[in-house]
Image (cartoon, rainbow, N blue to C red):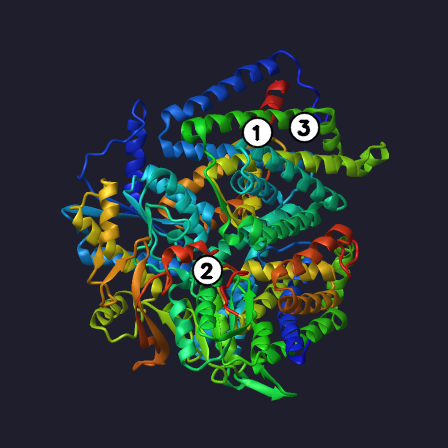
Amino acid sequence: MSAATKAPAAPGRADLKVVILVPAALLALAVLPFVLPTYQVSVATQILIFAVLAMSIDVLAGYAGRTSLCHGAIFGVSTYVVLYGSTVAGLPVLASMVVGVLAATVLAAVFGVLAVRTSGVYFLLLTLALGLIVWGVCLRWTAVTGGENGLRGQLQVGAFAQPRALYLAVLAGAAVMSFGMWRFVHSPFGLTLRGIKDSESRMRSLGYNVPLHLVIAFTVSGFFAGMAGAMYAVFNNFVSPSTVQLSQSVAGLLMAIVGGIGTLFGSVVGAFLIIALEQAVSLYTERWLMVLGAMFVLIMIFAPEGVVGKARALLARSAQRRGRQ
Amino acid sequence: MMDRRQFLKTTAGATAATAIGAPAIVQAQGSGPIRIGLLAPLTGVVASGGREMVDGFTMFWEQQGGTLAGRKVEIVTEDDASNPDTALQKARRLVEQANVHFLCGDLLANTGLAVANYVKGNGVPYFIPIIAADDLTQRARIPNVIRIAGYSASQTTHPLGDWAWKQGFKKLATIGQDYTFGHEQCAGLARVFSENGGKVVQQLWHPLNTADFSPYLGQLAGAGVDAVFTMQTGADGTRFIQQWANFGLKGRIPLMGSMNCTDQSVIRTMGAEPEGIITPAHFAEGSDNPATQKFVKDYEAKFSKTPSLYGFSMYSGAMWIARALEKVRGEAENRAAFLDAVRTTELTDSPLGTAVRLDAYGNPIYDIMIRKVVKRGDGKFWNVPTDTYPGVSQFWKYDPETYMKQPPYSRTYQAIKT
Amino acid sequence: MSLFQLLNGLTFAALLFVVASGFTLIFGLLRIVNLAHGALYLFGGYVGYTVGTHTGSFALAAVAAMASVALIGLILDQGLLRFVRGFELRQVLLTLGVAFMLNDLALVIWGGDTFTVPVPSFLQGAIVQFGVFYPKFRLFVLLVGVLVFVGLWLLLNRTRLGALIRAGVDDAEMVEASGINIRRVFLLTFMLGSALSGLGGLLGGAFLTLYPSADSEILVFSLAVVIIGGRGSLEGAAIGSLFIGLFNTFGQVWFPELAYFVIFGPMALLLAFRPLGLFGRAA
């Protein structure tokens, strides 16, 4: 049996790991805001939001084999809609968030349909172009988006006015999203996607409607990116064309890559590493862009499978060696 | 002054150590250093302006000896990367981790708006000598956001409209960057000029970072106007002025511009192309006022370049803060008293050489000079005043409350009287 | 619209062609989408500016710009890209990382001010013909664009190296299998493509100025040209440049509000429905 296709985990030991580790991790994360100072709590909130964005990118890249550069734009569109809804349209915050996620999902569906015939580098370039179009619209449609000034509001109402409470709400949201994405990629649909990633022609000859699967995958991935974007709106109280620009998509992609494409939870690690690194580096120097670029280069050369990917590979190798003894 | 990195590291360590069981930091009132959070774009599209902001600001405090009212002054500088999301992040870090007493700076209007939105919620004083978005001191003003030593976009162009009419120009065309700052500056000119009886025949707008102005220059050349007004900042200014000369329009059609157009940050890397351009401003580095000349000499000695608006405004802003702090004997913790002192300070020793004070809405009142770009003795070019309009506020001659009832200037509302 | 606007579009197209021709060569032969291409343009321009202002010679500046950027291309290919040969996506993302680094390095070395590459005196000023007053330098750029096209066409169609490149664009494996040192051909192509970008930076730096975000702007234009014209096709790059150059100019005059969409729109549509562009052929 090749490493690419995994048999369903044997019950007992594997489940025990999940049952213990996941609640433990969640508990540790829930306790954080009580031990960290205010600013670090807001950084942690940011990490959680971007982890969800990176995971949504991984759903498409790691499980359907399509690397995209427009998820930042989808994320940002949700942020825009939430801010527009709660300031200009006067909707309650939660209702705006629902509309925001809806908008992101619809946009992802449209992008998915446009991009369904491409793959690899062309898919990357097409999503890049689509993301640029979104940015152009946000910049020029001043009447709705506020142009380069963007939109601002005060969305941290009621309980969410406290950074600690906001963090816990985002943590809950991120946990639910992660669980949703995990279930999605491990569902029969997710397995089909992995089949498509491995060999499209084989899946087609087996009778699967590959384009439909890809469009659905794109849409679902966009849904989760939209959820992250909605949370960002509440966290930031502000949106501008910078939120949808290419660098946002690049950052999300880098987090997914650093963590490990195809590992899903690697994105959490990736988001943490990138944001923590940015915080640390910017204390000493303005050369963050240089450091980020260097990271990109080094990861591509030495660890393209990311941190978690590499860890898994090492663990698998040592398990193999143990098995042979 | 303590190095900001050293400062932030020790603060991070201290906060981490005391955080458990005591998440809030309690400060002794009126002791310890005064901490200023300085935000500026040190990377990104407007990096050169950001650099000068930091230079001008720190130059003042160094001249002061780095102390005020017996307390050390610490400046913690953060790069906002010409990006509002980053500006927000850094503002949070400055306020929540570095525990600064107040924030100052930012260059691009959208970074300023983002940070203003943040301080609206927590009351931290935020001073914006460079951000010129009209509404921050008009319809959308926030009590703890004050535009010390700054200006509102249309403040300098209102008098230019009057001056243009007095020159005998009857028909004008404008070309400006297509964003709020551009709309507001052009509108100031268009409104006053048209109210005097002039005609604004054509208005062109181009996106920020337009590299190639040739399509617009073609239209301007054929518009049949007496003069052209251009609103540009940064690299767009450099390119517009160069291409205006390259296409033979220099000398053929009189050119007026916004203050930032012929700012030193734009013209110091050019040759003779900007010569003769007329711009309205409160600051003219070529003015023979002794206070201005002293400032220019000091700045040139320290940084080997003639000061731009960015350096001057932040220097004046620092001076304003210092005078206000002196009034409250250095008690930066007492926000209400400090803000009140800022609002009532009259800056008598500003490099402008004239006294400057704020109007009732948080924006300074200036003598606006109509300047011309001329060559000076050493072959460099600078802005020299030719006429002055004394005591111009952000509302020109209009009544503030009536003014604010109208919509804000925008691309579609240029307040042109027909 | 008028001769004036037509010239504006053509001269801008010429600059785009110089830059995009390099991009399409690299994309066509090496299958690498070099996202650092814009940074190479900017770097070349800055180097050309420094050499030009210190020596007063535009020719020396041109040589310096092209040589320095070809050198960076050499380092990029031999030092970094060699580790990810065959992995298309990794190559693309690696070049993106390099683009960030070069952009920041340029900011450190030259600062954020806007610079103009000095132009020799015989190219300053304007020509007055047919009632149009047009800058000489822009016409010079148009001439250079034509010369680059002719030069590249001769290279690709009349030299052995060119034949190898064309064969490699069609089928790299087969060329390799016939015993030719395809690696050297690849490297030379990469350096040539980079040098063209550097030359573009020098020219662009003279009439459009150099500033920190020029790299991403020219990169987007190059991507649009190559996507419309087709990967690896010289004619495609020429047609694409004309299309984008004229579209951009007339778009600015007729639809100023839609400034960006006249470029991104066609680009996205083509990618969605005809990814190979007008003249590209399937790998």
Q: Residue at x 14, y 48 (%)?
A: B69
Mark 2 vs mark 1: tell me if same chain: no
Q: Mark 3 points at which residue?
A: A185
Q: Nearer the viewer, mark 3 or mark 2?
A: 2
Q: Between residues B172 and A62, which one lies in front from this camera angle?
A: B172
Q: Mark 1 points at which residue?
A: A265
Q: Residues within 10 Å of mark 3 (few under 14, many from 20)?
A: many
Q: Between residues B118 and B73, which one lies in front from this camera angle?
A: B118
Q: Which residue is drawn at 42% across and 75% down?
A: B270
Residue A12 x %, y %: 62, 11
User: What secondary structure is found at the residue carrying circle 3?
Assistant: helix
Q: Which amino acid does label 2 sit on?
A: Phe
Q: Is B125 situated left or right of C219 in this image?
A: left
Q: Is B60 situated left or right of C180 in this image?
A: left
Q: Mark 1 lies on which chain?
A: A
Q: Which chain carries label 2?
A: B
Q: Which residue is drawn at 51% across and 59% down?
A: B410
**Total numbered labels placed on residues in the image:** 3
Q: How crowded is mark 1: few (under 14 residues within 10 Å), some or many (20 or more)?
A: many
User: What secondary structure is found at the residue carrying circle 2?
Assistant: helix
Pick whichever of labels 1 and 3 is earlier in the sequence.
3
Q: What residue type is labelled 1?
A: Phe
Marks 3/2 in contact by CB < 8 Å: the verdict is: no
Distance between the alpha carbons at the discs numbered 1 and 3: 12 Å
